[in-house]
């Protein structure tokens, strides 16, 4: 599939709709070679196309994180550059699935920490999730995350409080079994 075909499937409607992104997900999973064409749509000038492309890429990356491998630098760059909240929340969820070097991982963590100051509660909640996932296996960062999650359990929005409680439980479970 060509990126224009993906863009036409992802266009139209309003921000409250995912449009035909699930159809795009199914098409790419059936034909993974088309993944780069979908990825191009994340840089679309049409905010509906870019957000729905990000939604589709994020959904695909759950079962096929290997498709992200070649594109980690571009995705990390987009995460650093974009101010579009819908792109930010999907990119936050994608970042822990990227295979990153130590220096790139540090950039991802810095970007996600910046997302904690975003005006969108969804972006902040996704950033908390991503930071916690990136902390797994790093005792110093896990300790930092416990403090941050405890803070958000008290000061965050309802979604941030709920997610923080759940993530604290995951970190405590990992600590007791690990």
Image (spheres, rainbow, N blue to C red):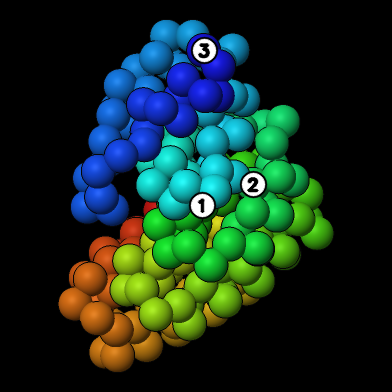
* Nearest-to-viewer mark from 3 and 1: 3
Q: Are marks 2 and 1 in contact (CB under 8 Å)?
A: yes
Residue marked by disc 1:
91
Q: Closest to the observer: 140 or 167?
A: 167
Tell me where residue 30 appears, x and y as whole percent: 42, 9
Horizontal side, residue 109 vs residue 124: left or right: right
Taking the spot 30% from the left edge, 39% from the top edge, the residue there is 12
Q: Is residue 43 above or below residue 160?
A: above
Residue 1, label in figure = 3
Q: Is residue 49 above or below residue 111?
A: above
Q: Secondary structure at mark 3?
A: loop
Q: Is residue 17 above or below residue 31?
A: below
Q: Secondary structure at mark 1?
A: helix
Q: Closest to the observer: 151 or 118?
A: 118
Residue marked by disc 2:
75
Name the image quarter holding residue 156: bottom left
């Amino acid at each position: 599939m060509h990126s224009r075909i993906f863009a036409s499937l992802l266009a139209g409607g309003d921000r409250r709709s995912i449009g035909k992104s699930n159809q795009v997900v199914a098409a790419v999973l059936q034909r993974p070679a088309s993944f780069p064409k979908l990825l191009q749509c994340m840089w679309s000038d049409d905010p509906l196309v870019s957000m729905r492309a990000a939604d589709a890429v994020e959904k695909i990356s759950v079962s096929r994180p290997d498709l992200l491998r070649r594109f980690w630098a571009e995705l990390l760059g987009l995460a650093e550059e974009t101010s579009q909240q819908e792109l930010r929340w999907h990119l936050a969820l994608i970042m822990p699935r990227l295979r990153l070097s130590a220096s790139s991982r540090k950039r991802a963590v810095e970007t996600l920490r910046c997302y904690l100051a975003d005006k969108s509660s969804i972006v902040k909640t996704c950033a908390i999730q991503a930071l916690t996932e990136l902390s797994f296996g790093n005792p110093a960062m896990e300790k930092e995350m416990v403090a941050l999650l405890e803070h958000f359990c008290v000061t965050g929005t309802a979604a941030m409080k709920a997610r923080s409680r759940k993530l604290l439980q995951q970190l405590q479970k990992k600590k007791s079994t690990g």
